[in-house]
Image: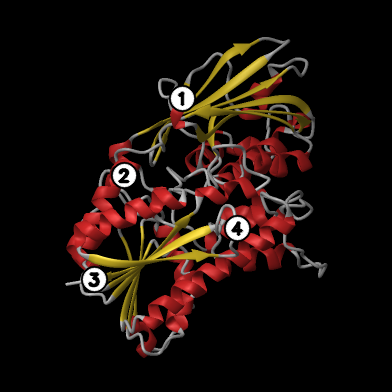
Amino acid sequence: MLLSLTTIHQPATDLGYLLHKHPDQFQTLDLSFGKAHVFYPEATKERTTVCLMLDLDSIDLVRASQRTSGDGFGLRDYVNDRPYVASSFLSVAISKAFGSAMNGNCSQRPELVETPFPFEVAISALPVPNGGVFLLKKFFEPLGYAVEAQRQPLDDHFPEWGESRYYSVRLRHTLTTKELLSHLYVLIPALDNDKHYFVSQSEIEKLLQKGEGWLKSHPEREQITRRYLIDLNSLSRQALDRLNESGESLPSQEAPLVPTEDRARKETLHEKRLKLVADKLRDSGAQSVLDLGCGEGKLLVHLLKNKTMTRIGGMDVSYQSLLKAKERLHYEEMSPRQKERLVLFQGSVVYRDTRLEGYDAAAVVEVIEHLEPNRLNSFERVLFEFATPGVVVLTTPNKDYNERFETLDADEFRHEDHRFEWTRDEFAIWVKSVSEKYHYSFELFPVGDVDEKVGAPSQMVVFSYAD
């Protein structure tokens, strides 16, 4: 994980005074999650570059783990991208290594604190799970930065795997060092969904302190705030209320990644999908229902309205999503009787888990396309062979329909985390295979408005156990 700051301010070596790091010294700082190294690959009066490199100890991270999010597979703590990408770890390291500069302190040359420097910032690998270059520019360009970003492939040896969610980023701007470091401190963790620390009330104070003087006037202040606070509504609302204490209206800035009219249509499709799934589960007569890949709990909201369902489970691989689900459902304010109906837990659909057993029905809504194709067999066994609910309601995108999306290129998936998308024929073949292998009957249904040529945007199957 590498961050470099380059300036051609004259003399460029003044940067060393601001950062309280001598250009001739290689310095190492101990952090709770590893070490941070500060060094200058070049330091002349004409051009100076300082680098901050993180060396994370993955084993120590596991030992001290207080998980706030995750993918849910067994070796995730040991096999992940955290040591290599710019994320919340880098934000903490910036505060530790360059804290004096970020707070505007320079005892030897105080006049430099308010001196704008021409900076070029290079971030070797910045994860942007949702939004890509579009989101990078939305965050940095309003602050005056010129943004260059190159998306990295998943693997140079396997180009067919496509591109990754990681970008090599260069930012150029003339501003004070204090402003630059404050922008990086807030925006780097706001771009990535993963946080290595527990997001609590104290994070509001850090956000407002480091965002002082620029966040309130930023056109994307709401989206930055929500992403920095992992979209926890209670914390985000408090932070936004404090940013907006002047009383001016605070419009929503969660801009879509597609035109507004497409977003509205997709949101309508999503609601149609949830309602249809809820209706199929209700019609099945199931009294206990498990939502596999429950995400932020949108389907659970529908299920809790059905009084005949006495036991409702929600499982997701992401602890962060489960926190959001609890907040969406107002879990802490629920009556004891309502809480008895609902259980949320972290887990994976590709690992056998006794907690999945004993439910009348299961919902799998837009989940399987996020699995690697070679994990589908594991998913099938976990759900149909071991858990064996009486009814399974499953939905997935219809690849045939993708040509109707103007924002999609040929052979591009609807979401960067999708590992495959099936045509209607491919889906039907898989459904028939599952039916025959695990003794389930099935019915297929379209989800959304049906196009005569390419079908509906999504497709659904309702499996019923035929013992």
**Which residue is disc 2 drawn over?**
76
Residue bearing mark 1 = 159
Q: For residue 222, which quarter of the picture?
A: bottom right
> Label 4, on which residue?
452
Inspect the image, locate mark 1, and give the three-letter code of the amino acid beneath it. Answer: Pro
Give the residue type at disc 4.
Glu
Is 81 or 217 nearer to us in this picture?
A: 81
- Which residue occupies 47% across, 83% down? 333
Is 393 displayed left or right of 189 in the figure?
left
Q: Secondary structure at mark 4?
A: loop
In which quarter of the view is residue 272 placed? bottom right
Indicate the quadrant where residue 182 lies: top right
Question: Residue at 78% of width from left, 15% of height from top?
Answer: 10
Res 299 seen here: yes
Q: Nearer the viewer, mark 4 or mark 2?
A: 4
Residue 23's x, y, as percent?
58, 16
